[in-house]
Structures are given as structure tokens and as C-alpha cells.
Image (tube, rainbow, N blue to C red):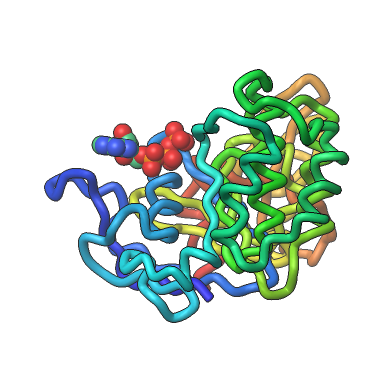
Amino acid sequence: MISIQHLTFGYKKSRPVLEDLSLELKPGHIYGLLGKNGAGKSSLLHTICGLLFPGKGTVRVTGEEPARRSAKLLQQTVLLPEEFYVPNGSVHTYVDNYAPFYPTFDRALFSRMLAEFEVPADSDLQKMSYGQKKKMMISFVLATRAKVLLMDEPTNGLDIPSKRQFRKVIAGTAAEDQVIIISTHQVRDLDSLIDHVLILEDKRIIIREPVERITQKLVFKQVNQPTELIAPIYYEGGLKGYAVVGVNHDEEESRLDMEIFFNAVLSEKQQIVPLFNA
Ligand SMILES: Nc1ncnc2c1ncn2[C@@H]1O[C@H](COP(=O)(O)OP(=O)(O)OP(=O)(O)O)[C@@H](O)[C@H]1O
């Protein structure tokens, strides 16, 4: 569905943000895109939807180059940016104006999601809070039923019940023919939703793994002392003891702690990345 080969992109030629980045993404999955501030996550999402153009290499979405901005592809690729603009008017007016760009737009689904998020459909967009606008935009993006949904920090600004509703609506609408990429720093909001982890570091994707494979290779534990795990690769102390990551030598079952995994990968790249390339 999404095939990126040797992509190099930079706002200035002399300073690439993404360099020789290759990535294949398949439909039917929810990918969590993680990376430090400034790693290039938003730039990558903008390149996938054709708002930024590759300097070198190729980006293909359903076989087409997004940079060509064909109507057929634009109807099937939707980006929810981190910062977005809403025009004057009501939610109804917004849908009347923008839904026609998406032939698969599902108005009934949109109304159900607004109700789920408790956003009144007759609200004036300019009078809504940031969180309410965001929930309207999330509902719109999902209701397009587009094949490629790209969301940049979608849970920023959502209150705690809305984060739970967000997980519920995504889990309830994600389809087998869709690729969903969610760029986030709020991994704890989403770690039950994401089924593949992408880590962008050093201008390329250094981890692209299904959650099950991560927990096959690594074991995640909460312990009183880090030494309770033989040869831990990484640990972090907290109020309840230590979160520890080690090599899963004994095929132990554990639950992926995405935040600890991300920190472990960045801190112990040399040890962890080769485990997945083997
Ligand atoms: N419009 C722009 N012009 C010039 N440089 C830019 C522009 N947008 C982003 N950059 C630079 O490109 C790099 C990657 O930015 P990008 O927004 O893609 O990162 P990010 O991983 O999404 O960051 P964050 O997690 O902070 O949102 C940063 O060094 C940033 O300063």
C-alpha cells in the first residue's frame, strides 16, 4: 500500500531531515510512528500525503506518487495535522463543504462519532474549544473511510475520557483495507491500539516491528531491583520499582511497554536494533 524507497528529504538541500529512508506499510494495520522532537515524523507524513516532495528516492501510495497529487489518490489519503485550521461556520457547514472531496465519506459514521465524542453537530466551529475542534476533525478524518489515514499527535488536547473514546472509535472503524499511521509522543494513550511500532531516528526508520515480534525478542518487567532480570538491556526507576527490558531468552510472555521500548531503543540502539535485523 505504502512503499518508500531510499527517500531523502530536507527543507534545505544541505540539511536532510530524512535520508535514505525505506519503508513498506501494509493495509489492515495501525502503525505508531515514534521519534524525538524534530526527528522528522511530520515531514514523513507530509511526504506520504504529497504535501512535501522527495528530494531523492520514491514514495508510492497504492502504486501512485503522492507528489503528483492525483485526484484519485487525494480522495483516499487524509492527514490530520498537529495544528489545523477550521473555517467559519458550523460542523454541518464544514461537512457539506469538505465531505464531497471524499467519495467514500460516511455521514452516518460521522454523526455517530460526534455523538460518541459529545460534540453537538450544530456547534459554531470558531466557538468550540481546541479539544472539541480536534474531536470534530478526528471524526471527519475517520468518516472519510479513506485508504490512508495519517494522524499527527491526535490525542494532544483531548481530555482523559476523550482519549478512551478515541481508542474506541479507531478500533471500531479501522478496516482491513486501510493503513493508519499515528505519530505520537503520547504512547501510553495509544499502546493498546497500535499493532506495529515505527521508530524514526537518525533520519531513517530504525524499527518497524509488529508488537508480537517485539515481545518475542524482548521481555518487559516491573521489578523491585533491575538485577532481578539477568543482564537487563535497559531500565528506568519509578515510584513502583523499575521497568526493565531484557532479551527474551526463555520465550517469556510479557506486555509491551511502548514508552520503555522507545526509550530503550534510543538509549541502547547498538544492542536492540540488531536483534530485529537478525
Ligand atoms: N517548514 C519548515 N521549514 C524548515 N525546517 C522545518 C520546517 N518544518 C520542520 N522543519 C525542521 O525539520 C525537522 C523535522 O521536523 P518535523 O516537524 O518533521 O519533526 P517531528 O518529528 O514531527 O517533530 P515534533 O515531534 O517536535 O513534532 C526539524 O529540525 C524542524 O526544525
Indicate whether 200 appears above or below 267.
below
The picture places residue 18, in percent across and down from the top left corner, at 31, 53
Q: Is residue 113 above or below residue 176?
A: above
**Which residue lies at the image location 73% right of the left edge and 27% below the top edge?**
123
Q: Residue at x 59, y 62 (%)?
A: 102
Q: Left of 139 or right of it: where is 109? A: right
What residue do we see at 72% from left, 49% from top? 230
Q: Is residue 136 visible?
A: yes
State which quadrant residue 173 falls in.
bottom right
Residue at x-position 48% and y-position 73%: 72
Vertical side of 66 occupied by 118: above or below:
above
Residue 263 visible in rendering = no
In terms of depth relative to the viewer, which is nearer, 160 or 233? 160
Quadrant for residue 114, please give it.
Answer: top right
Q: Position of residue 275 (x, y in %)?
A: 55, 64
Q: Quadrant of ligand 1?
A: top left
Q: Quadrant of residue 165?
A: top right
Q: Residue furthest left?
A: 14
In the image, farthest residue toward the bottom: 63
Residue 206 as seen in the image, left or right of residue 257: left
Which percent across, then down, holds residue 39?
39, 42
Q: Residue 181 location, x and y as percent?
A: 58, 56
